[in-house]
């Protein structure tokens, strides 16, 4: 614990500089004129020299240091908003504060006055702002995509290159060969340990509550860690600071609402709630349908203490409930019950110490728990992880060319895995502590180069073993021409918490210990980015990832466990995870292309991915390399949204405008090569059974040596939005898998043998057929 404050003190002393008295500083916040929300990622620069510029951070704060005295025009540019211009005068040594309020643009992107040359704006927007392997989806983009039930963040991210689903039934993200537990999910700075509802059909992120969602697919900086593959950082809405605002929606499976309101003239409050009602409708009429429902809710309060201090309080809670009874007529329990969920909460203090020194400090709490019970075999299982974290960071703007960020985290964890069964008890508990310190420096020596270096120190303490790791990070962006950037990133990553999946059974959260080392990975990424004409943007990236000491569940774990003691009934108690998992290495490589159109009557993207992932475990596949289940060699995604009225105006050569009644057609097409499959290499009949019957035995081939048929699906949606004076309505109709293609999930082998005549038939189990759904959304 003492190492963190010492680290921060040394870092602060190293980078604190004497304020230049002959130059001025411009700083402040950028907010939305319609609701007062702070805007993240806005470009703020001076027209006279676009090298004097800044990008707003997660709090909407910007700083332009070391400005020579004189008169300037401040320009604030943000996609979807009118470009803001304001004349200012900077005196020698002045620390000027300027709050910028910008108005939503609607759809009149062609009518925006361009006050800076395209090449100059590209320096700010494309070189400084766009990080390697980072993608962002706005709430409007998420809502426009046709989905299984309703708009969903995780399912929308699955349409991007390098992000794969395991099946139609899952919203889990497999990013560049990694597994879902290797992704760091965050809501308002708080870790979320299980982001899925309904076994993956829904995610825990309510789209109506989202303000901004960023996915880093690799090469992320030292600020983030604890996971091997990616970071999904979600910021929820602070709330409307100008007036009361609400929205509601109802679909075939769920109902939801979001409300926002100001708190005096200094704050705001927002809240969302959602619940499925399948159990209250169809589930009540059909006994054979299992009882299932989930609920979740968000709340967030934001308050300006004064011009330099802001306070944010946010919370989330959600839980799933499943009760499956195999025999309704039996007096004895004959079913499965399973419930799981998350709770999170955070308090954040934002402080402007000086125009050049900005800080954020959080206290967060997160808890995931699951309870799983099989009545027939008398097995009960509970898995729980609790995370209490105190963390903070400071951003220091030395000059327009140099910025530093340093921070710390202290995590106090409590992990439990308890399983009772007729022959004994597994009771594994630990209270590890994870101490973290990191530092990053962003250097822009010229308009051609942007270089970021970072270092992250990890100290993970468990009851029987400690882990010390240092993770270096590096990324560089080079402006080849006015519209073309080249990018490179390298990073080392460590993970000490793992979520181990089990097919059709509850996943297990476990921690590194004396039996299993922490998992490690290294990322190598090379990228090309080009800003094309008429709102088109092209990104090409290639990557290579190495994995070490990753975990996989061992199906035959019980014989390997060592008994520590016995309970009062004489049953053994296993109090460690030895033998529960296999540990091995792996690698992943790939090539990705993303062509995206952000403006106009037709928007969307075309993505392509060529990838290969391999794992190697000593006790799996006879120690030979194999391809994991989630690998897909090639994937193509095409997403497009058509604003019908403005599309017709485009054909007529007329400028776009916002209409009170708007038809939108959405389309999502995906093609992917089949997933790996383990097939039998031979079969034999054992006819020595006393009753004269015979049993068929299959000898499996190498693990995942074959592949299922290719996957393809086309989804479409139709939305009509009608705007009235103070409210709007948007009914929608969507068709999932409109071609009714029977995409194969897995195969089963049915034995129709007679005597010594072997007859083995293959049955293909398919995923969702054609699924029409409809619903309606309101805003008021």
Image (tube, rainbow, N blue to C red):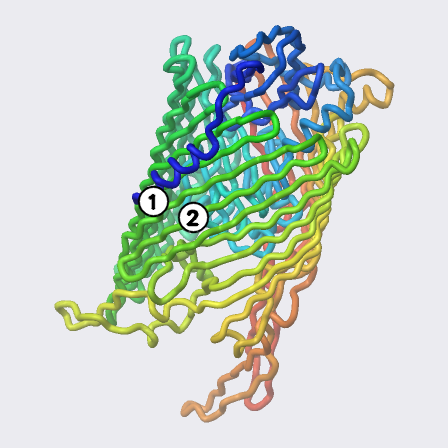
Residue indicated by mark 1: 3
Q: Is residue 2 among what the camera can see?
A: yes
Is 413 or 717 nearer to us in this picture? 413
Name of the residue lying farthest toward the right? 652
**Marking on residue 140:** none
Q: Is residue 206 above or below residue 658?
A: below
Residue at the image position 58 percent from the left and 7 percent from the top? 91
Camera-nearest label, 1 or 2:
1
Q: Residues within 10 Å of mark 2 (few under 14, many from 20)?
A: some
Residue 428 vs residue 641: left or right? left
Evaluate if marks 1 and 2 touch, with contact meaning CB atoms under 8 Å apart. yes
Q: Residues within 10 Å of mark 1 (few under 14, many from 20)?
A: few
415 shown above or below 236 = below
**Residue 185: % across, % down:** 47, 42
* Of 81 and 506, the residue lying toward us: 81
SS at circle 1: helix
Q: In this rendered view, identify the residue nearer to me: 113 or 374.
A: 113
Q: Which quadrant holds residue 701?
A: bottom right
Q: CA distance from mark 1 to mark 2?
A: 10 Å
Q: Residue 81 appears at what percent x and percent y?
A: 65, 18
Kindly state the secondary structure of the residue where label 2 is placed: strand
Quadrant assignment, res 109: top right
> Residue 733 placed where, x, y %?
63, 33
Q: Quadrant of residue 437?
A: top left
Earlier-in-chain disc, 1 versus 2:
1
The residue that disc 2 covers is: 457
Identify whether 475 is placed above or below 122.
below
On-image quarter of the N terminus: top left
């Amino acid at each position: 614990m003492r190492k963190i404050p010492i680290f921060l003190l040394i870092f602060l002393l190293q980078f604190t500089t004497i304020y230049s008295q002959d130059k001025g500083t411009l700083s402040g916040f950028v907010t939305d004129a319609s609701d007062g929300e702070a805007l993240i990622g806005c470009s703020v620069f001076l027209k006279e020299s676009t090298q004097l510029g800044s990008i707003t951070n997660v709090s909407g704060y910007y700083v332009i240091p070391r400005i020579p005295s004189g008169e300037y025009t401040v320009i604030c540019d943000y996609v979807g908003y009118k470009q803001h211009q304001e004349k200012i005068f900077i005196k020698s040594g002045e620390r000027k504060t300027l709050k910028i309020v910008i108005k939503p643009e609607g759809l009149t992107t062609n009518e925006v006055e361009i006050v800076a040359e395209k090449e100059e704006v590209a320096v700010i927007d494309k070189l400084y702002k766009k990080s390697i392997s980072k993608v962002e989806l706005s709430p409007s983009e998420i809502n426009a995509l046709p989905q299984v039930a309703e708009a969903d963040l995780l399912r929308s991210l699955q349409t991007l290159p390098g992000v794969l689903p395991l099946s139609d039934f899952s919203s889990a993200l497999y990013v560049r060969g990694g597994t879902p537990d290797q992704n760091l999910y965050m809501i308002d700075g708080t870790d979320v340990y299980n982001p899925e509802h309904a076994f993956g059909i829904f995610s825990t992120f309510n789209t109506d509550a989202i303000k901004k969602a960023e996915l880093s697919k690799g090469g992320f900086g030292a600020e983030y860690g604890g996971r091997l593959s990616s970071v999904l950082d979600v910021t929820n809405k602070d709330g409307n600071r100008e007036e009361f605002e609400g929205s509601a929606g109802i679909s075939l499976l769920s109902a939801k609402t979001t409300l926002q309101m100001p708190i005096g003239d200094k704050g705001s409050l927002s809240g969302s709630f959602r619940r499925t009602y399948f159990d209250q409708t169809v589930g009540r009429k059909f006994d054979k349908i299992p009882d299932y429902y989930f609920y979740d809710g968000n709340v967030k309060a934001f308050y300006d203490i004064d011009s330099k201090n802001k306070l944010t309080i946010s919370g989330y809670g959600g839980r799933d409930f499943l009760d499956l009874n195999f025999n309704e007529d039996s007096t004895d329990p004959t079913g499965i019950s399973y419930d799981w969920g998350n709770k999170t909460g955070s308090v954040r203090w934002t402080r402007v110490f000086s125009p050049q020194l900005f800080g954020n400090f959080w206290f967060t709490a997160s808890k995931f728990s699951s309870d799983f019970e099989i009545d027939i075999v008398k097995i009960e299982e509970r898995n729980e992880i609790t995370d209490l974290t105190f963390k903070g960071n400071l951003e220091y703007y030395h000059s327009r060319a140099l910025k530093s960020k340093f921070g710390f985290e202290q995590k106090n964890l409590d992990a439990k895995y308890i399983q009772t069964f007729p022959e004994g008890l597994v009771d594994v508990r630990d209270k590890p502590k994870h101490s973290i310190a990191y530092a990053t420096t962003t250097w822009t020596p010229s308009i051609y180069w942007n270089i970021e270096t970072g270092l992250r120190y990890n100290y993970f303490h468990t009851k029987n073993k400690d882990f010390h790791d240092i993770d270096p990070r590096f990324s560089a962006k080079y402006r080849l021409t006015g519209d073309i950037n080249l990018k490179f990133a390298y990073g080392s990553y460590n993970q000490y918490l793992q979520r181990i999946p089990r097919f059709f059974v509850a996943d297990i959260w476990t921690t590194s210990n004396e039996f299993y080392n922490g998992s490690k990975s290294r990322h190598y990424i090379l990228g090309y980015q080009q800003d094309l004409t008429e709102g088109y943007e092209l990104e090409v990236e290639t990557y290579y990832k190495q994995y070490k000491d990753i975990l996989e569940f061992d199906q035959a774990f019980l014989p390997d466990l060592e008994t520590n003691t016995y309970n009062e009934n004489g049953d053994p108690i296993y109090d460690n995870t030895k033998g529960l998992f296999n540990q091995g290495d792996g690698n992943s490589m790939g090539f990705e292309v993303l062509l995206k159109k952000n403006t106009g009557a037709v928007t969307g993207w075309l993505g392509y991915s060529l990838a290969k992932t391999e794992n190697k475990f000593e006790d799996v596949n006879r120690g030979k390399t194999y391809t994991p289940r989630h690998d897909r060699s090639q994937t193509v995604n095409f997403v497009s949204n058509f604003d019908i009225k403005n599309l017709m105006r485009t054909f007529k050569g007329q400028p776009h405008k916002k209409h009170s009644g708007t038809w939108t057609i959405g389309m999502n097409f995906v093609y992917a090569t089949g997933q790996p499959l383990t097939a039998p290499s031979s079969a034999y009949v054992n006819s020595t059974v006393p009753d004269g019957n015979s049993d068929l035995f299959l000898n499996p081939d190498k693990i995942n040596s074959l592949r299922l048929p290719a996957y393809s699906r086309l989804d479409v949606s139709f939305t009509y939005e009608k705007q009235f004076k103070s409210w709007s309505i948007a009914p929608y109709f969507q068709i999932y898998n409109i071609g009714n293609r029977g995409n194969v999930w897995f195969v089963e082998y049915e034995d129709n043998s007679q005597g010594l005549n072997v007859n083995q038939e293959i049955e293909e189990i398919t995923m969702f057929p054609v699924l029409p759904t409809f619903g309606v959304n309101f805003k008021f």
